[in-house]
Amino acid sequence: MWEQRWHPLREEWVILAAHRQHRPWSGEEIRSVQVPLPTYVEDCYLCPGNSRVDGQRNPAYRHTFVFENDLPCVSTHAPAAAPPRASMHRSTDARGMARVVCYTPRHDLTLAELDHGGIERLLGVWQSQYIELGAHRDIAHVLIFENKGEVVGVSNPHPHCQIYATNFVFKTIEVEARASERHLAGTGRVLFQDVLNAERRDGRRLLVENDSAIAFVPYFARYAYETYVAPKQTHPSIAALSASELSDLAVVLKEVLVRFDNLWRMSFPYVMALHQAPTDGRPYPGVHFHIEFHPPLRTPTLLKYLAGPEIGGGNFLSDTSPEEKAAELRAVPDIHYKQAGSSRAAGG
Ligand SMILES: [Zn+2]
Ligand SMILES: [Zn+2]
């Protein structure tokens, strides 16, 4: 395979060179050590009852727990930007709020291992956080994301995500929103619905589907195992989903995560991001809320490095075929390997 595929949401070409995936490799290998974690860790700043860097103590929470990030990247107290010295330079204030959401008091679990009720409850928290933070007058966007795994720089395995509510809209969201608006104005159709319809017609990259939610490896995937999870109906944000849509979404999300972990029987690293409409007060009828997973590993030990083409040239070069990667994810069981092991053991 040697071709370019158009990414309509990012408005860029993705270069596919899948014949390169078996090239000899003598670089660094990622070693994932799978030590079973305890359910509670005394010096974990996210475990219930423990104190954090700023001295505050976590409550004895039972489900999810949301708090203001103690070391925020953005703050409402940010000083005004200094005027640039050169007239061609521009600067403006970077302000906002940063929060952390603990998924569960259990230090040893991951999102993949939460039960349906736990994931559904978390989706409800994302809804209320988006609504609450987005309602602030100077918050233009709410970015909800999870970095999972040491290869994406996460030192604390306690399951959690982060929220950046900012006075600016992140670049990818801005590009996607603009592309969606232009598509709606030009065709009368929602761009993401066209993406969904094409995936359904083709079928080779579909992973999971139920009444109102769907997951697939997009035709234009940049990463091996890149996966989109979305409601079928167009909603500009997670806030607009009904209770039954939220429940269906939780089912599909769970199955995707279980398939990720089952692929190599290890906790699967990823960057997960919720893509939804900015909260700058304008309507975004063309935006279709979806969750994107960007997994950094190509094999259990090989990391996708961003190098010349991506950093130097600005386009992604993918060494894998989205059709093959989707088939791999479909081929693994939909019961988490840890649970499958314990139920076998329990069943004697
Ligand atoms: Zn913990
Ligand atoms: Zn997106």
Image: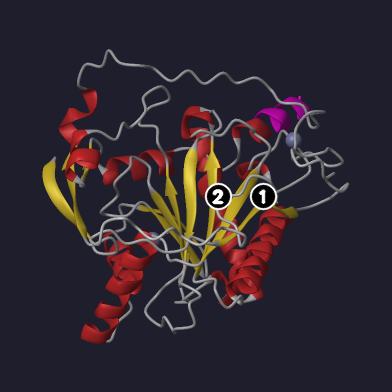
Magenta stretch secondary structure, dominant: helix
Report the amino acid beneath label 2. Cys
Spot occupied by residue 215 in the image (x, y as percentages of width and height): 44, 57
Alpha-carbon span between mark 2 and mark 1: 9 Å
Residue drawn at the location 59% of the way across and 65% of the way down: 248
- In this rendering, the answer to whether 328 lies above or below 20 is below
Q: Which residue is mark 2?
A: 73
Q: Are marks 2 and 1 in contact (CB under 8 Å)?
A: yes
Q: Residues within 10 Å of mark 2 (few under 14, many from 20)?
A: some
Helix or strand or loop: what does disc 2 sit on? loop
Please say whether residue 196 is visible from this viewpoint: no
Q: x, y (%) of residue 165?
A: 56, 63
Please tell me whether residue 20 belongs to the stretch shown in magenta: no
Relative to the observer, which residue lies in front, 136 or 333? 136
Task: Please name the amino acid that badge 1 sits on.
Answer: Asn
Placement of the C terminus among the 4 image quadrants: top right
